[in-house]
Image (spheres, rainbow, N blue to C red):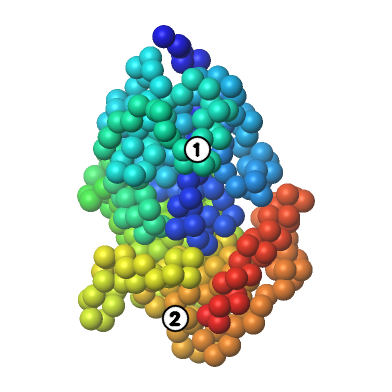
Amino acid sequence: MWYIGAMNLCIFEDEKYVNFYPLTLSRPVFELRTGTRSLREKLLHFFPANKIFILTRPYLEDILMEGLKNISFEIPKEPTLFINGRVIPTQSLENSITFRGEEILFFNNETLIAAHVKNGKSFEARLRKKNFEGYKREEIDAKIVNYPWELVNQNGSEIEKEFNLFGNSIPPQRDVTMLRKEHIFIGENVVIMPGVVIDADEGPVIIDNGARIMPNCYLEGPLYIGKNSLIKAGARIYSASSIGNICKVGGELETSIFHGYSNKQHEGFIGHSYIGEWVNIGADTNNSDLKNNYKEVTVYINNKPVNTELTFVGSFIGDHSKTAINTMLNTGTVIGFSSNIFGEGFPLKFVPSFSWGGRRRLSIYKIEKAIETARLVMARRKVKMSDAYERMMEQIFEETKKERNNGT
């Protein structure tokens, strides 16, 4: 019998990262978030490891090295647990893939969920070729996401699960109405101004450290507001929403996920949507999340139509994209990485990355100009664009040339 006590953990991307474009153009699939944390952070909570290894696209490695500590891309020739980065881990999954002293691969239908192997390096080569001959296989139940709207739909239940990680803490507040206080967490250095209603009747509300809530906001759980984010006066945020760190949000928001550093400061409705990082949503931008005929919504993923089999689906907006004032977005609209949307009427339901314009005409947003603007935007939040980040943007521009040439 071999031993995996000092566990090596490898989180890997499989070929389905393209199903999450444009959000995964600039991050591995396991850096997507649902609830209060990323999929990677959830996996590390259930499967703590002495050494952490990552398998992802090469052009993302330098960015990950800048943002994450104690990770490596050199898989060891030692016993290793591999886990698919699209997994939303549960206690049931942890129990299912407990080490049993043998090499074994765990599948859910045809998807590899996890693998206990003696030699991580040799298995990496087999994994890249999807050659699993000779390994013992076991079928297990697992929660795995295939498209971005599934992250949105899991968001409320994930917030509820993770509330216990924060606990119940409420510093003294003045003129703030709180419903079901035992399901509310307010972190350190949070400022909540008078007239705010925090409604945890339908799920917990978590307001993380350093957040500021301006007067007369309505906050309905399940809800997570990230560190140092600002909720503008009069905002209405409804159930199952997560707002990342250092965001500014106003107007009306429902059942949506924001990554960090994104802004929706003004009036307008965003619902059942997933918003990337460094996105700016202009005043009175509204998205539809329900068709007038109440039929299922089709979304263009990687420029191909996919039936979501859902009636409530909003928008999916890649990093560094922007909408002008009074922009209207149809159900299931996808806006790529670093695009600028303006003009009358609804834009196309699939807007390629590095596009500039609206329904009448889209031109290519030159990479030099896109990098220049991104650098300025990041500097406003005291974040310096690194050489690795610039190289990533250049690579994304090359990766997405085909979608701009398809006549969309």
Query: Which residue appears at 47% of the width and 41% of the height?
Result: 130
Label 1, on which residue? 127
Query: Which residue appears at 60% of the width and 77% of the height?
Result: 405
Considering the numbered disc 2 on the image, is that residue within a helix, a strand or a loop? strand
Label 1 or label 2, whichever lies nearer to me, is 1
Residue 288 drawn at (x, y percent): 36, 75
Amino acid beneath label 2:
Met
Is residue 310 something that shows in the picture?
A: yes
Q: Quadrant of residue 162?
A: top left
The residue carrying pointer 2 sits among few (fewer than 14), some (14 to 19) or many (20 or more) residues within 10 Å by Cα, namely many
Amino acid beneath label 1:
Leu
Q: Is residue 67 above or below residue 122?
A: below
Q: Could you tell me if the residues under marks 1 and 2 are in contact, i.e. CB atoms within 8 Å?
A: no
Query: Which residue appears at 28% of the width and 78% of the height?
Result: 291
Furthest residue to the top? 1
Q: Nearer the viewer, residue 370 or 167?
A: 370
The mark found on residue 328 in the picture is 2
